[in-house]
Amino acid sequence: MKRVLGAALGVFTAIGGFMDIGDLVTDALIGARFGLAMVWVTVVAVIGITVYSEMAGRVATITQRPVFDLVRERMGARLGLANVVVSYLLNALTLVAELCGVALGIELATDVHYLLWVPLVALVTFFVMWRLPFKHMERLYGLVGLFLFVFVVAVWQLGPDWGAMWHDVTHPSVPSGEGLPTYLFYAVVMLGAQMTPYEVFFFSSGAVEHGWTTSDLGQARLNVFIGYPIGGILAIGIQAVAALALQPAGIQVEHLSQSVLPVVMAFGKLGLACAVLGIVAATFGSVLETLLSSGYTVAQHFGWSWGKSMAPTSAARFSVLVIATLIGATALALTTINPITITIYAVYLGAASLPFTFLPILIVANDRRYLGEHVNGRLANALGVVYLFVVSAAALVAVPLLIATKGGL
Amino acid sequence: MQETSRRGLVSLAVLILAGACVGPSRSDGDYRQKVANAAEATRSAVETARLVTRAAAEGKAPGRYSSLVLSEAEVDASSIAESFKRVQPPSRRIQHLREELSSVLDSSTSSLAALRIAAYQGDGERLSELAADLPRLSSKLARFEHLAAG
């Protein structure tokens, strides 16, 4: 039991990263539009984020310093600052979407407009940030987020043709009526939704918050190797139920309420209750991850005291920044800006910025001055370089595809 | 150099915005594509309503959830109809497509509104009665998708 709970940081990070509002809608949208023809993207994303989180977690565990603290030291303040500015803005933008995501999840159960829930969600976030210890936070939201497995179980309940599903997964092709640019556009969207930079910031900083040392290296790896595949399985589950229930009807997913419709069809009210619980926990987890990551990146770059585990008076600048970010994001969410649109753009910009997150990690993870004998091995380096090319290629084609497909039309 | 980069950024922004807007149709083919897109998107709203009303009839979808789904479907359908009607057909040859599709879009929006009200009032019998019209609307919309492709 202790070992299972010990993997809570990884599960929490992965559920917050793989099951945020962007994923919940994107997975269903892609499943309804392309069937299972993009499962391979999720597999690619799971391996990629696992490789880089393992590196970031190892760096944090061995040095007891988060990876972006070392990036600044290793690569200089100017390059580090550009990375921090982009990362902070992306985190803050994603936070707006996630605040709305929690509210949209509550709206599913109450039919009370989500905007009325946004201030309440922000208030609860504030109390959780300051009153709930880090370990309890990750266990509570990580484990409740596992209710999302209702999507995976619903695949069985919907009675699929397993042979046909396996064929679709192993022989991905562009469905008739869809163009290759649109298919690639959504592949980039999905890659960006599932390989978010804040997952790496959060996991690396969380390792420091936990006070992990060299002896906890196994624990850090266990977190990564359990957490991300769980996130990937949930993502594939959502794509699969959407492919089974929504694609035959020609439904284009635009709302969270449509994402949970297959679960309602499979399990009725109990299924809806599980889905809502899982969605609220997962998106609330994403709120905490993006909010903390906003504070982590800036505080670590400027060398401020930081940490959720520290008293606000001991990390005053970090705390003020986190509160200001929360207030700003809440205000932006209340302008009635469309959260799904924000999510798609945040995801897309995230995909474009991934090389700038991954390259410094790869460099630091190969530096013997920091890691000694724990530097990257051949496999980690080979996978790291391959993924650097993959995310760089995605970043290069992101804007041309956005224009060519008019945003995926 | 800075001026060049700024111009580049402005051009890019204009390109993206132009791509995202609903512009006038320049040719019959372009208009037919818009007809197909509007019909397809509205059919998605109608089919969503069809699935949720079926789940409600089977006692699987609670009233509040059904009401929310139907309300979103209605807003989507209404917004598609408004956008579609704003586009002028480029020639008289395909003027009839505008009138025919507009009529189906209006019927779809009205049906979805009636369903939403029935769900809100918790009137399951009326909901099932009104839902019986959805397959017919869906088929009509599907025909427009195929017509436009041809």
Image (cartoon, coloured by chain):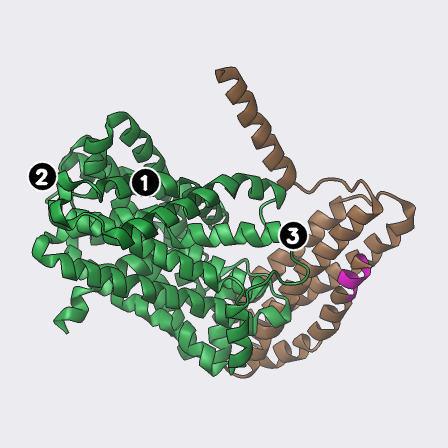
Chain colours: A green, B brown
Q: Are marks 1 and 2 on the same chain?
A: yes
Q: Are marks 1 and 3 on the same chain?
A: no
Tag 3: Cα neighbours inside 10 Å, few (<14), some, or many (≥20)? Answer: few
Among numbered discs 1 and 2, the one appearing first in the sequence: 2
Residue A36, percent across and down?
A: 52, 67
What element does badge 3 sit on? helix
What amino acid is found at the position of numbered circle 2 in the picture? Ser
Q: Nearer the viewer, mark 1 or mark 3?
A: 1
Chain letter of disc 3 in the image: B
Residue B27 lies in magenta, yes or no?
no
Establish if A393 lies above or below B126: above
Q: Which residue is mark 3?
A: B79
The answer to whether residue B84 is left or right of residue A213 is right
What amino acid is found at the position of numbered circle 3 in the picture? Ser
Q: Nearer the viewer, residue A114 or A402?
A: A402
What amino acid is found at the position of numbered circle 1 in the picture? Leu
- Magenta range is B143-148
Residue at the spot x=30%, y=54% of the render? Answer: A51
Residue A363, percent across and down?
A: 26, 40
Q: Nearer the viewer, residue A264 or B130?
A: A264
What element does badge 1 sit on? helix
Q: What secondary structure is the stretch in magenta mostly built from?
A: helix
Establish if A182 lies above or below A303: below
Q: CA distance from mark 1 to mark 2?
A: 32 Å
Q: Which residue is mark 2?
A: A314
The answer to whether residue A193 is left or right of residue A83 is right
Chain letter of disc 1 in the image: A
What element does badge 2 sit on? loop
